Amino acid sequence: MTGDASTLPPIIQGGMGVGVSGWRLARAVSQQGQLGVVSGTALDLLLTRQLQLGDIGGHLRRALAAFPYPDIAERILKKYFISGGKAPDAPFKTSPMISHEPSLWTRELAVASSFAAIHLAKEGHSGVVGLNLLEKIQTPTLLALYGAMLAGVNVVLMGAGIPRQIPKILDDFAAGNAAAMKLDITGGTEPVFIHVNPADFGASPILHRPIFLAIVSSPVLAENLRRKASGRVDGFVVEASTAGGHNAPPRGPMQLTPEGEPIYGERDRIEPSKFVDVGLPFWLAGGYGRFGKLHEAQAQGAMGIQVGTAFAFSEESGFDPSIKEKIIASLKTGSLKIHTDALASPTGFPFKVAQISGSVAQKEVYEDRCRVCDLGVLRETYQKEDGKVGYRCASEPKDIYISKGGDPAAAENRKCLCNALCASAGIGQVRHGYHEPQIITIGDDADCVMELLDGRESYSAAEVIKRLLA
């Protein structure tokens, strides 16, 4: 694989949630000759909690056996692996939050978990595999990138912000050098960097520089990244507001419908011709999961499409099977409603949520939950009065958030996406018998799922690709 994005396949499988786009789904897509993508969000939680569930099939232990630093792998297994799995009502032992000054243990765990996911996604085929990361989640980024590159990741995709720093980081790691990333610090007056040096882990093998695709929603941002990023941006995924998960906020002042959904206007409409003018390969995303949409996108100058929702409910996705059953049942009865919630995510980005019983979408379900922030994946980094770096989250207990200088209004109606997304992947925390509720994110165009089911109860990732290519 060269550094030319034009050599990539026409179909990119979206990087979704915590574990939804796991290694099984990515591998199934890559085996079909398309770009399978692993979600890089909370990979350390996935690794450690699945080890505590007994590592069914032994896949994670097999991946750790291939990790180039065996001493680290041994320490992880000793700390987290439970033969036969933990008791159903026993809480998970949770890995430490990653700060701007991560401990050696935290660094080792983050690198190993990213390696394991990509290694398993690449097993048994010669196709291409990508890693999807969020610019909003900065502290694990360097470690996740290094671990993925150790496993030979082919493509890195990044959105939910402006990822200007990533190209140079990829260049540095490929050259065997240390890399640094400047953190976004609310109220910060002095720059704060997180550093990762491959030499700290041991002798580093020669690494391949993956292709980098930035996820954008406007041609202005695409052109800015092409010209002003820290290194080579190879292409773009152009994501409309109809896509699932985090959406880019509307341009201009945030205005809401009476139901609390952001109002997107003419300025937010995707015009593919303007991305053609940028001059780099691009893929269109958001509502492209149905028959004929690939050819429609290519006719407008795109290399292809990124598809999330259709893959999210395939047999290989990492969604808890009960979620797939609920979504499919709701689709069949025509009762599924999808709400773009402007307040759910502590990131401040709108977040698209399926309205399913028993999930955090139901107000009464979430009101029963005691607010707690014990994972910290989506924490905000801010400067404290003493000049030091602190962390806060609009979804943590309100009094704690406000004591850290947080805006009281920002804490209203926030959901703990970290815990809820883990629950959706079957690794939700248990506290004194209370099981964390799930949250289900899905794109507006859920009809693609019904199209694929065609009266059946399930379908495979291979069937999604066959339909898209038809």
Image: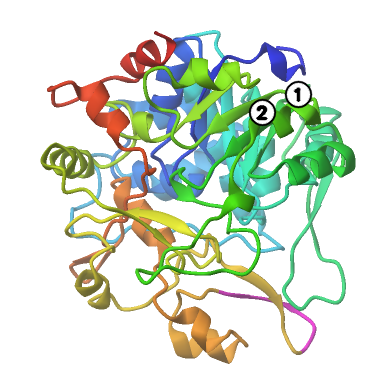
Return the x and y of residue 371 as percentages of the image width and height: 36, 77
Q: Amino acid at mark 1?
A: Leu
Q: Quadrant of residue 316?
A: top left
Identity of the residue drawn at 87% across and 42% down: 230
Find disc 2 in the rendering and name its residue. Answer: 150
The image quarter containing residue 456 is top left
- Would you call the spot at circle 1 few (<14 residues within 10 Å), some (14-19), or many (20 or more)? some
- In the image, taking residue 154 as reference, residue 413 lies left or right, namely left
Residue 398 placed where, x, y %? 45, 86
Tell me the colour scheme of the image: rainbow
Query: Which labelled disc corresponds to residue 207?
Result: 1
In magenta stretch: residue 221? no
Of 461 and 404, the residue lying toward us = 461
Of 374 and 469, nearer the camera is 469
Name the N-terminal-most of marks 1 and 2.
2
State the image coordinates of residue 395 (x, y, percent, origin top left). Answer: 45, 74
Give the residue at x 18% y 53%: 88
| 443 up-or-down from 420: above or below | above
- Residue count near mark 2 (Cα–Cα under 10 Å), binned few <14, some 14–19, many ≥20: many
Q: Are marks 1 and 2 in contact (CB under 8 Å)?
A: yes
304, 41: nearer the viewer: 304
The N terminus lies in quadrant: top right
In the image, what residue occupies the spot 80% across and 37% down? 167
- Between 204 and 234, the residue placed more toward the observer is 234
236 with respect to 48 (left or right): right
In the rendered image, residue 107, in percent from the top left (x then y), is placed at: 64, 50
Q: Is residue 31 visible?
A: yes
Local SS, label 2: helix
Q: Which residues are magenta?
A: 386-392
Q: Is residue 392 above or below residue 194?
A: below
